[in-house]
Image (spheres, helix red, strand yellow):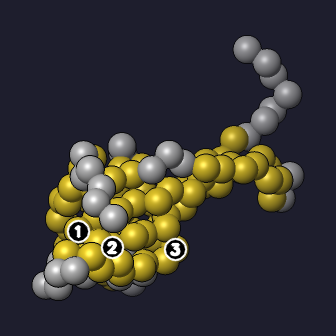
Amino acid sequence: MVKQLNRRVTVIVPGVTQNDQGGNEATTIDSWVKWAHVENRTGSNSFQNQQQTWQYDYKVIMRYEATRPTKSNYEIEYENYRLKVESVEIDSEGYKGYEILRCSKIDEFITDGNSS
C-alpha cells in the first residue's frame, strides 16, 4: 500500500495538570507534525438528550515511526478539528510501515426552532 501523504496533521499527546484551585485542566504534553493521507470522512446523525449530533469518522494513514508510535489515547488535529483516535493498526510493506488510524469527531447542533 503506497499512499500519497499530502496532508499535514498534528499528533497530540493529551495530559492533565492540576490548577491553583485543585481542579484538573487539560493540557498538551507533547505534539508533532506529520505528513498523512486522510480519506473522505463518513458520518451519521443521532439524537442524544434531544440534541442532534453528527459523528464523523476519518481514516488517517501516516508513516510509522518506531521512536514516536501513535497510541490510542492520543489525539489528531486536522483542519483545526480535534479528532479522537479510536484505533491504531500497523501495516507493513517490506521495511516500510504505515499507521492506519480510525478517528472520530462529534459536531453538535442546538436546534431552537428558528429558521434563518
Q: Do the CB atoms of the residues marked 1 and 3 lie less than 8 Å apart? A: no
Q: Name the residue tied to disc 3.
A: 86
Which of the two discs, 3 and 2, labels the residue nearer the N terminus?
3
Q: Residue at x 49, y 67 (%)?
A: 102
Q: Using the rendered image of the protein, determine whether residue 104 is visible from the camera's viewpoint.
A: yes
Q: Amino acid at mark 1?
A: Arg
Q: Amino acid at mark 2?
A: Glu
Which of the two discs, 1 and 2, labels the residue nearer the N terminus?
1
**Mark 3 element type:** strand
Q: Amino acid at mark 3?
A: Glu
**Coordinates of residue 14 in the picture (x, y in percent):** 33, 74
Q: Residues under labels 1 and 2: Cα distance?
A: 6 Å
Q: Using the rendered image of the protein, determine whether residue 70 is visible from the camera's viewpoint.
A: no
Drawn side of residue 27 relative to residue 116, left or right = left
**Coordinates of residue 40 in the picture (x, y in percent):** 50, 45
Mark closer to the observer (3, 2): 2
Q: Residues under labels 3 and 2: Cα distance?
A: 13 Å
Q: Name the residue tied to disc 1.
A: 63
Q: Which mark is residue 99?
A: 2
Drawn side of residue 60 relative to residue 52, left or right = left
